[in-house]
């Protein structure tokens, strides 16, 4: 009897082991987070193959919702969008910390993300890449733009662009002296803030050339000089700075908005081991530096900034002094249902004349 | 026995279209309808009702967007007809042989590339640092760069360009079938060019006009890329609204309801158009 079990176990392991090794990792991530050379190195080291789909926060959730959490083995939404999506749609599964090499992560960031992605007592997210959104400004032509509300100034009329998405609402609220994050759990108060921001953004609409949708679109608009001031991600500003020294990222006076993109496991992912292998691989300091050099954003890896190019470090330090870093407003988890209110506000701004 | 095999053949031939209809059209619509009648009352809690449809009529934003989309689509259809008719008439009646084929082909060539590429082409032409703006400046007609993109006129240009082929093709087919001797007889009987156009050509081309208009109207109404890319900040379009409900708002219930309303309301507009032009759908489709 015992021998049968042992033999069958032996065969089972013999059968499953090669399959486990040759897993295909279907990765749902942001552009730049899985550079070709990192994938090649990972495939050579582990034998897994990686299929990358690039996306954004909303599309990641929409894709996983459509399949009840299937179709992908690892996804990378921002940490503030995890608990509400889990509560509403149940599309993720908890992280098994025993399979993660926690020493690779900066402890404070690991703890903060764990705290922000805990739902029903289980942790769903690990931190990966962090960055901010603020202002990307052509300093030669719009040097006066220091805060989000300055985008509505007459001096830059017709040469301004921002996204019509929730970061814009939050950024404008802060620069109008309001505190939207403090009102996250008070629907009435949050609606009041949204109403004020809606009035401001509706007034500001004639100033806007167009609402941008993708990172390439805004970079094009800034590079051609059609837009001189915009609300955008820090990396976009630094990339443009390499081509045109006048354009750079400016941390707004009221505070840049800080986000952390995470690793989460989709509920019906089939290659968890490959996913954990990928996490432990990309958090290695040398790999993390490779990702920072392509994506432009820093990671939560210990010593991940050691191998980062000096240019990028200089640009980062040019945009952020210590007080600007201290002033970063980190997104807290979005409570379920809040996005419906924001959606209605954004629709009304879009429809306003 | 013989009838059995022919029956089998009939069903085999029917199977692909039946599969297409059931699997790709009817089933998804049933699913969409089920989603559209569930109202969200809390996380993962739903109840059945028509609240999402009520939202459309209760919130002016939605029906105004629909009205704007419909009116702009009707305008685009009219413009396409006005531009497409002379082209079709020229191809069908005033050219012969190789010229005719070449002209017809030239109408189609732009459609060999995808709609996205064509729309980006228009963006390159119309943008502030684009071809037209630079040409006007070098000719000395304007002093500074002009922005031609991101307004309703740009959307209209894009829509007409995208759909003109679908107007020209049915018109060429119907005008081709008009016997030239009828036009000559009209002149022999003392008709003027205008009266012949009004009494002979247009009545004969009516099925082509109507089917072209239906196709162009539905294409414009259901277009997503062109209004979003060319319209910029004023690009409010009903399909864009459905997209945001599904993708950025996670509100599939309202998105499905809006989708069904788009289907129902656009069908109603087409029905109304057929009634007003005194055409029937089967007549139109049968003759082209």
Image (cartoon, coloured by chain):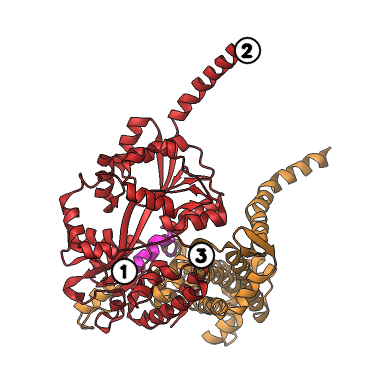
Chain colours: A red, B orange
Residue B71 among those drawn in magenta: no
- Which of the numbered marks, if any, corresponds to residue B44? none
Q: Is residue A264 visible?
A: yes
Kind of element beneath mark 2: loop
Q: Nearer the viewer, residue A209 or B51?
A: B51
Q: Which residue is mark 1?
A: A231
Q: Chain of mark 3?
A: B
Tell me where the magenta segment starts and ends, as one range: B106-124
Q: Is residue B270 visible?
A: no
Kind of element beneath mark 3: loop
- Gap in angstroms between the C-alphas marked 1 and 2: 69 Å
Q: Which residue is mark 2?
A: A1
- Percent of width and height locating residue B130: 27, 71
Kind of element beneath mark 1: strand
Q: Nearer the viewer, mark 1 or mark 2?
A: 2
Compared with A251, A287 (above or below) is: above
Q: Nearer the viewer, residue B163 or A254?
A: A254
Q: Nearer the viewer, residue A22 or B41?
A: B41
């Amino acid at each position: 009897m015992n021998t049968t079990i042992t033999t069958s176990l032996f065969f089972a392991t013999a059968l499953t082991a090669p399959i486990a090794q040759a897993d295909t990792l279907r990765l749902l991530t942001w552009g730049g987070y899985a550079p070709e050379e990192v994938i090649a190195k990972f495939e050579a080291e582990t034998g897994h193959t990686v299929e990358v789909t690039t996306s954004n926060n909303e599309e990641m959730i929409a894709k996983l919702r459509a399949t009840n959490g299937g179709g992908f083995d690892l996804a990378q939404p921002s940490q503030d969008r995890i608990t509400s999506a889990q509560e509403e749609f149940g599309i993720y599964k908890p992280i098994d910390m025993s399979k993660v090499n926690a020493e690779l992560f900066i402890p404070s960031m690991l703890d903060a993300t764990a705290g922000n992605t805990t739902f029903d007592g289980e942790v769903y997210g690990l931190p990966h890449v962090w960055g901010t959104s603020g202002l990307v400004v052509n300093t030669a032509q719009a040097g006066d733009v220091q805060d989000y509300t300055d985008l509505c100034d007459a001096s830059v009329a017709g040469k301004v662009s921002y996204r019509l998405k929730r970061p814009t609402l939050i950024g404008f609220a802060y620069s109008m002296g309001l505190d939207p994050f403090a009102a996250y759990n008070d629907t009435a108060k949050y609606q009041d803030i949204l109403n004020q921001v809606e009035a401001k953004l509706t007034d500001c609409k004639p100033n806007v050339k167009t609402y941008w949708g993708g990172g390439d679109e805004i970079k094009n608009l800034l590079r051609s000089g059609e837009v001189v001031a915009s609300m955008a991600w820090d990396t976009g500003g630094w990339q443009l700075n390499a081509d045109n020294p006048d354009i750079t990222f400016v941390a707004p006076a009221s505070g840049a908005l800080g986000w952390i993109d995470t690793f989460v496991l989709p509920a019906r992912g089939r290659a968890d081991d490959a996913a954990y292998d990928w996490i432990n691989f990309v958090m290695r300091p040398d790999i993390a530096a490779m990702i920072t050099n392509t994506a432009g954003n820093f990671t939560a890896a210990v010593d991940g900034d050691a191998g980062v190019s000096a240019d990028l470090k200089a640009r980062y330090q040019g945009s952020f002094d210590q007080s600007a870093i201290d002033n970063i407003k980190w997104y807290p988890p979005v409570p379920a249902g809040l996005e419906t209110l924001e959606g209605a506000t954004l629709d009304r701004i879009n429809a306003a004349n | 026995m013989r009838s059995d095999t022919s029956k089998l053949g009939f069903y085999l031939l029917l199977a692909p279209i039946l599969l297409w209809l059931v699997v790709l059209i009817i089933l998804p619509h049933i699913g969409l309808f089920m989603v559209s009648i569930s109202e969200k009352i809390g996380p993962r809690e739903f109840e059945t009702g028509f609240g999402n449809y009520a939202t459309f009529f209760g919130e002016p934003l939605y029906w105004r967007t629909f009205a704007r989309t419909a009116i702009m689509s009707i305008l685009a259809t009219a413009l396409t007809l006005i531009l497409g008719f002379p082209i079709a008439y020229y191809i069908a009646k005033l050219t012969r042989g190789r010229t005719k084929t070449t002209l017809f082909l030239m109408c189609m060539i732009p459609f060999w590339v995808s709609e996205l590429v064509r729309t980006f082409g228009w963006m390159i032409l119309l943008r502030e640092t684009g071809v037209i703006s630079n040409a006007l400046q070098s000719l000395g007609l304007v002093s500074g760069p002009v922005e031609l993109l991101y307004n309703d006129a740009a959307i209209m240009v894009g829509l007409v360009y995208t759909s003109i082929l679908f107007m020209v093709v049915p018109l060429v087919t119907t005008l081709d079938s008009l016997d030239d001797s009828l036009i000559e007889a009209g002149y022999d009987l003392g008709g003027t060019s205008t009266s012949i156009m009004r009494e002979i050509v247009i009545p004969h081309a009516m099925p082509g006009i109507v089917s072209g208009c239906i196709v162009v109207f539905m294409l414009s109404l259901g277009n997503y890329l062109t209004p979003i890319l060319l319209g910029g900040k004023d690009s409010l379009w009903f399909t864009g609204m459905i997209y945001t409900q599904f993708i950025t708002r996670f509100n599939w219930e309202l998105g499905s309801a809006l989708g069904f309303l788009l289907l129902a309301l656009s069908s109603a507009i087409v029905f109304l158009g057929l009634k007003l032009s005194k055409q029937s759908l089967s007549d139109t489709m049968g003759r082209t």
